[in-house]
Amino acid sequence: MSINARIEQLLQGHKVLLFMKGTPDFPQCGFSGQAVQILGACATEFDHFNIFEDSDIREGLKSYSNWPTYPQLYINGELIGGCDIMIDLYKKGELVTLLTAANAVVA
């Protein structure tokens, strides 16, 4: 299976997927930690993928998304962006709107 097919399979299996360094309980960089906090503040159910556990995904996702850094947030298979974009969307109230539309906000 090609790397792009593996990435697409991961994305199809999750409404909200955060490719990050580490895990939500133990983020291994500040930006990944901030991304987890933002999703928590939005009361979001999300899945994560620790890019340190699979170097093929870590490198292939950069080409797939045309986004060179981590974390990367996807909602319904669509790249939303990294930490800075998440912060901006959160402050504008737009991130919770996107997450609500994806039925990923816990009532």
Image (tube, helix red, strand yellow):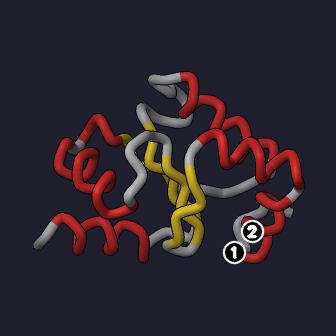
Residue plotted at (88% across, 53% down): 92
Q: CA distance from mark 2 to mark 1?
A: 6 Å
**Residue at point 59%, 67% (across, down):** 75
Between 59 and 47, the residue placed more toward the observer is 59
The residue lying furthest to the left in this view is: 1
Return the residue nearer the eye: 37 or 84.
Answer: 84
- Considering the numbered disc 2 on the image, is that residue within a helix, a strand or a loop? helix
Residue placed under numbered mark 1 in the picture: 102
Where is residue 3, by image quadrant?
bottom left
* Circle on res. 98: 2
**In the image, residue 14 lies at what x, y percent?**
49, 68
Q: Position of residue 95 (x, y in %)?
A: 77, 58
Q: Is residue 3 above or below residue 41?
A: below
Quadrant where the N terminus lies? bottom left
Q: Give the image quarter of residue 38.
A: top right
Specify whether 21 is left or right of 106. left
The crowding category of the residue bearing disc 2, from other C-alpha atoms within 10 Å (few below 14, some 14 to 19, many at least 20), is: some
Q: Residue 32: horizontal and vertical position, in percent?
A: 54, 33
Q: Identify the secondary structure beneath mark 1.
A: loop
Task: Confirm or deny contact between disc 2 and disc 1 (CB under 8 A).
Answer: yes
55 relative to 28, above or below: below
On screen, residue 75 versus residue 90, left or right, reads left
Position of residue 24 in the picture relative to residue 34 (left or right): left
Disc 1 residue crowd, few under 14, some 14–19, many 20+, Cα 10 Å: few
Q: Is residue 98 left or right of residue 58?
A: right
